[in-house]
Image (spheres, rainbow, N blue to C red):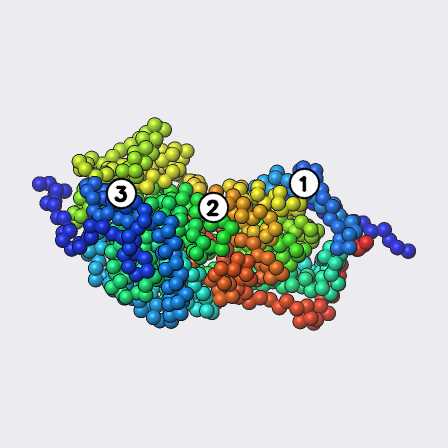
Amino acid sequence: MSRLAVPKTYKLFIGGAFPRSESGRTYEVRSADGGFLANAAKASRKDARDAVVAARGAVAGWAGATAYNRGQVLYRIAELLEGRRAQFAAEIEEAEGLTRAQAGAQVDEAIDRWVWYAGWADKFAQVAGNANPVAGPYFNISVPEPTGVVAIVAPQDSSLVGLVSAVAPALVAGNAVIVVASERFPLSAISLAEVLATSDVPKGVVNVLTGSPAEIAPWLASHSDVNALDLVGAGELDWVDLEIAAADTLKRVLRPEPGPDAAAPALDRIAAFTETKTVWHTKSLR
Amino acid sequence: MSFLEYAPAPESRAILSLRDEYGLFIDGEFVDGRGTPFQSVSPASEERIATIANANAADVDDAVAAARRAHDRVWSRMTGRDRGKYLFRIARLVQERARELAVAESLDNGKPIKESRDVDVPLVAAWFFYYAGWADKLDYAGLGANPKALGVAAQVIPWNFPLLMLAWKIAPALAAGNTVVLKPAETTPLTALIFAEIVQQADLPQGVVNIITGAGDTGAALVGHDGVDKVAFTGSTAVGRAIAKQVAGTHKKVTLELGGKAANIVFDDAPIDQAVEGIVNGIFFNQGHVCCAGSRLLVQESIHDEVVERLKQRLSTLRLGDPLDKNTDIGAINSREQLERIRELSDAGVAEGAERWSAPCEIPENGFWYAPTIFTNVQTSNRIAREEIFGPVLSVLTFRTPQEAIAKANNTPYGLSAGIWTDKGSRILAVADQLRAGVVWANTFNRFDPSSPFGGYKESGYGREGGRHGLGAYLSPASVTSTGRGTPRAVEAAPAASADEKPAKRTRRPARPAKKGAAK
């Protein structure tokens, strides 16, 4: 007796909730062999702007959490991903047409990258910060702080590893993120959102949009309340225009990285979305 | 003679041996520019100082080509130790010629000699001395082993600290192994050209430092040049935006140090005498021509009247006049154009209902001058509370609670600097944490040091200058080439990628599907 499956409705993830696109639009996601997988939400400009509002609202709490706490929350994501390993592997296997082993290896890699970044949360400031020996009676210290709201165009040729590789480093220092998922492989992004929603990540810290990056990214690139733009997966878009739009508010921009090594784990991906603050304190016995 | 009156004590200009005309400094020599030359004038007297060559696009080509040759053939192959020795030489030469540089700076820029002599030029020497020592220690810059220079750096600097900004740009670039083409501001090219002579005295290999003079179009040609790998700019946010657009889609790395509208927050428990001095130093240092100037005074309501009264008293004792006079506190505004902008914004402040008070001082007949000015009754929406005036004009606002002070301080698209005045250490640290600004001064203001990173949040730009961070802005990790867009970035320590490395974990905690029946 075969049992009739219960397919999932894939929606957006904004401010900790799973709304449909306000536009009512969806687009068909097909498997590697052409079969119907789902109707994913096709996010609109309004959804992108809602996501920015949610992200902005989440920055203070996330950035203000202790680094130890952020590290634990990020590690918790890895724990939950591990528990859902088979689900993600099956999703990736179907979507990308990989073998189960290959798909499983991708999930493992994604999990291990979360763990790697989680461990940085309470160490990054020690590596990126400085006590500065200034010539005068001052205590002078430089520390990295999160840039704020980071909009990301996720790597487009990967379901989960690319997404995780772009999102995790931005979260380490305390940024809030709006990520535009792979257009072709959006389902893992929403499944990841389910993990985020049931872990201890405060709502709004990660917002996931599915749909057309070419349509959504310009609204994020030009949005005044977005502080940084990661174009790692925007290589196929008119990304120069996105960088030009970002210049209007002097956003920090990471340019596209093609290939399977895109967004490889690196300390400078964390650093890219931090600002160095230097504080001078007077020293005196009086 | 009252106690405030001093006999004139001008620094002698005899120490200068200026040329009547200056060419462009390209490939180790002064050459004629192909654009129309312009005059550099003293803003204090409007007298002509020298005729300055104007670099056109062909000159920019030559300068970039010279820098490229020097990079590829000499500078990138030289040991860090030797690069460092050249920088140490430059630091010493700056010290040896310090007084000459200070006099030239005050003459050309209009800043008081006590500032150019005691702040600008000593910091210039310190900057070269600091980065000289980095040249053979790049492995410790924080980018992993064997970081690479970016190549040719295009550097465009402003007129407010002409020689100091040159040092901020050139010293880290050279230490990291880059060669440079630097364009000083149109109104203040003099000390950069004297610096070119220092480069010759140091026997720096030709083409490592190129200095081209000109206006905005020269800068744009330099920034947009295909042969440039790195752009470093200090100046207005408007030009910074234009540069960010110009370099979009290229491989160029960019650092921008732009405008500011810093809040200087004074709590009611602050040591008032020190705070008043700090407020004065914060906004009237260098005539307020300081991107990190404390131009918005946020004073706790309970001490507002006292602070304003004492500020007025203090400002009434400042001496405005000849920049070369050792007693001068307030020098000349750098240009007529800047003076007009200060007047325009200041008039807008009055029109919007703020109360203007200017120190009673005699304004010299010639030159560009603006008396130290305070605005009270300023609303956060007023232009004088939002826009960078870049002049000796202070806007005073009030607050009641620390939260309100923080909110008002952060209520700006800028984020370069801020000040906090209070006797309470824990409050300093908590407020500093919440200010969105790259440099925070607690119970002091406008301090600079080569070991201390400087740069902004938000629309005050990106990247840092000074310290280890400033060095990193001229380096890339070993695995990233300077020209290859999209090449893999350095992996500090990538986690194991292969699945078969952790079978033990798999068997210990077998994975289960989270949901049944998802497969079709």
Q: Secondary structure at mark 2?
A: helix
Q: Secondary structure at mark 3?
A: loop
Q: Which residue is mark 3?
A: B334
Mark 3 → mark 1, Cα distance in angstroms: 55 Å
| B18 relative to A149 in the view: left or right | left
Mark 2 falls within which chain? B
Instruction: Name which residue type carries label 3.
Output: Asn
| A126 relative to B332 in the view: left or right | right
Q: Nearer the viewer, residue B142 or B225?
A: B225
Q: Residue at x 21, y 40 (%)?
A: B46
Q: Residues within 10 Å of mark 1 (few under 14, many from 20)?
A: many
Q: Nearer the viewer, residue B167 or B218?
A: B218
Q: Residue at x 46, y 47 (%)?
A: B246
Q: Residues within 10 Å of mark 3 (few under 14, many from 20)?
A: many
Q: Which residue is mark 2?
A: B245
Mark 1 → mark 2, Cα distance in angstroms: 32 Å
Q: Residue at x 22, y 55 (%)?
A: B101
Residue B276 in sight here? no
Instruction: Name which residue type carries label 1.
Output: Ser
